[in-house]
Image (tube, rainbow, N blue to C red):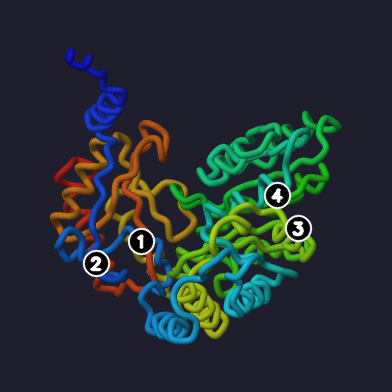
């Protein structure tokens, strides 16, 4: 029997891509967490100060959320067993949506599996061929991917620039059936806030639908963490709010908030809602407990902002560039990806877990360490973190 011809490696291109990532300092090394979320983590076996998590309010391991999840498991079990339209819709899911609608001061809410899914649930349903989606140039990947799922036209406006949005909308006048203007609320890499009042004015003038992804504003902005629409006082004017329950709320899931007729329509057409199992019982119960806590007190939100002020002041006094941040997201701008990775590795040696962010997450030449503040950080934690940044910054020539 003749020998088989050698089959070429069909995935050889992957080797080249991986080698290129490593050479440019952009290869992502995924760390292993060996503890519950909090101000301190066990990472790769080492206890370190946590400046990485989106756990803004410290709820991810809060006793009230843990107890709510355990109680729900005892009553409902663990998994939902089905999509919500068949046999997976529990009374907990209904309760969460009702509570979120009241918290957000909207007519209705539909909950889905994640914030990423929330954008995919709403944009392809509302927009199609003959329509136009107008998006901020720095919008999150979940918005970009949701737009790609439609046959609608696409246009970009300059970051946080309502005048440029007006230009785009003016050029589109009379050419499309519907227009959707969509923006992040808080931009996750820079920590700056969309001028939602100006964007709403521009969209209203053009008769465009307005949508905001407030993943990093929920639990952070507005009265007691009610989000960016509340922050700008746009209740009743703004059309669609998308949020996540995996950051400030400390659990997992996403939602779309707005008019009752919008939510009714999404229940009929949103593919993540129709074709993926419901969120788990313990997650849903824990999210309800998080809403309870936010409604009861602003203490955690207030502490988050106080910690942010202390950290930013300490970094500024040492000469670090923290960009245009207006929120508890604090980018420490370093420029090159290799420097950012070296800085992150040196911080880890000093007991601080703060990851480097580089291309393609941010543009080339704008690599950074992204620090995420939390209400769970103590004054001593902040002092230790600031001190570590100062030590490493001087060693690497970033500050004097």
- Name the foreground residue: 93 vs 377: 93
**C-alpha gap between disc 4 and disc 1:** 31 Å
Residue that mark 3 sits on = 265
Tell which tag, 3 or 2, sits nearer the viewer.
3
Q: Which residue is mark 2?
A: 41
Q: Earlier in the sequence, mark 2 or mark 1?
A: 2
Coordinates of residue 178 in the picture (x, y in percent): 80, 41
Instruction: Identify the residue at image location x=51%, y=82%.
Output: 293
Q: Earlier in the sequence, mark 3 or mark 2?
A: 2
Question: Dot 3 surroundings within 10 Å: few (below 14), some, or many (20 or more)?
Answer: few
Alpha carbon distance from label 3 to label 1: 34 Å
As drawn, which residue projects farthest toward the right? 174
Mark 2 → mark 4, Cα distance in angstroms: 40 Å
Q: Alpha carbon of mark 3 to alpha carbon of mark 4: how far?
A: 28 Å
Residue positioned 41% across, 40% down in the render: 361
**Residue assigned mark 1:** 53
Callout 2–callout 1 Cβ contact below 8 Å: yes
Comes first in the chain, label 3 or label 4 = 4
Q: Residue at point 29% right, 46% down?
A: 356
Task: Check disc 4 and report its element: helix, strand or loop.
Answer: helix
Q: Are marks 2 and 4 in contact (CB under 8 Å)?
A: no
């Amino acid at each position: 029997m003749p020998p088989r011809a050698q089959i070429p490696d069909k995935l050889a291109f992957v080797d080249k891509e991986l080698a290129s990532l490593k050479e440019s300092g952009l290869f992502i090394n995924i760390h292993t967490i060996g503890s519950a979320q909090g101000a301190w983590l066990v990472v790769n076996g080492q206890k370190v100060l946590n400046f990485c998590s989106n756990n803004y309010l410290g709820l991810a391991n809060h006793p009230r959320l843990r107890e709510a999840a355990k109680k729900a498991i005892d009553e409902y079990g663990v998994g939902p067993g089905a999509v919500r339209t068949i046999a997976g819709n529990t009374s907990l899911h209904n309760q969460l949506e009702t509570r979120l609608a009241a918290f957000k001061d909207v007519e209705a809410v539909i909950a889905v599996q994640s914030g990423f899914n929330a954008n995919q649930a709403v944009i392809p349903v509302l927009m199609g061929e003959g329509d136009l989606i107008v998006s901020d140039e720095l919008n999150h990947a979940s918005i970009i991917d949701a737009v790609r799922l439609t046959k609608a036209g696409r246009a970009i406006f300059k970051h946080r620039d309502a005048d440029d949005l007006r230009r785009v909308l003016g050029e589109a006048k009379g050419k499309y059936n519907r227009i959707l203007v969509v923006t992040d609320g808080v931009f996750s890499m820079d920590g700056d806030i969309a001028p939602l009042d100006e964007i709403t004015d521009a969209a209203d003038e053009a008769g465009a639908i307005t949508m905001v992804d407030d993943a990093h504003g929920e639990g952070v902005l507005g009265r007691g963490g009610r989000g960016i629409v509340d922050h700008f006082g746009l209740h009743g004017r703004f059309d669609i709010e998308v949020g996540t329950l995996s950051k400030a709320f400390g659990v997992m899931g996403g939602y779309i908030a707005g008019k009752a007729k919008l939510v009714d329509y999404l229940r009929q057409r949103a593919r993540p809602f129709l074709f993926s199992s419901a969120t788990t019982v313990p997650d849903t119960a824990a999210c309800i407990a998080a809403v309870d806590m936010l409604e009861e007190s602003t203490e955690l939100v207030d502490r988050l902002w106080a910690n942010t002020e202390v950290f930013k002041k300490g970094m500024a006094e040492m000469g670090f560039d923290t960009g245009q941040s207006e929120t508890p997201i604090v980018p420490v701008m370093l420029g090159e990806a290799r420097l950012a990775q070296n800085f992150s590795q040196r911080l880890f040696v000093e007991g601080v877990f703060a990851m480097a962010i580089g291309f393609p997450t941010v543009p080339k030449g704008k690599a950074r360490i992204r620090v995420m503040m939390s209400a769970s950080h103590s004054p001593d934690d902040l002092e230790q973190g600031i001190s570590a940044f100062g030590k490493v910054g001087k060693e690497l020539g970033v500050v004097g």
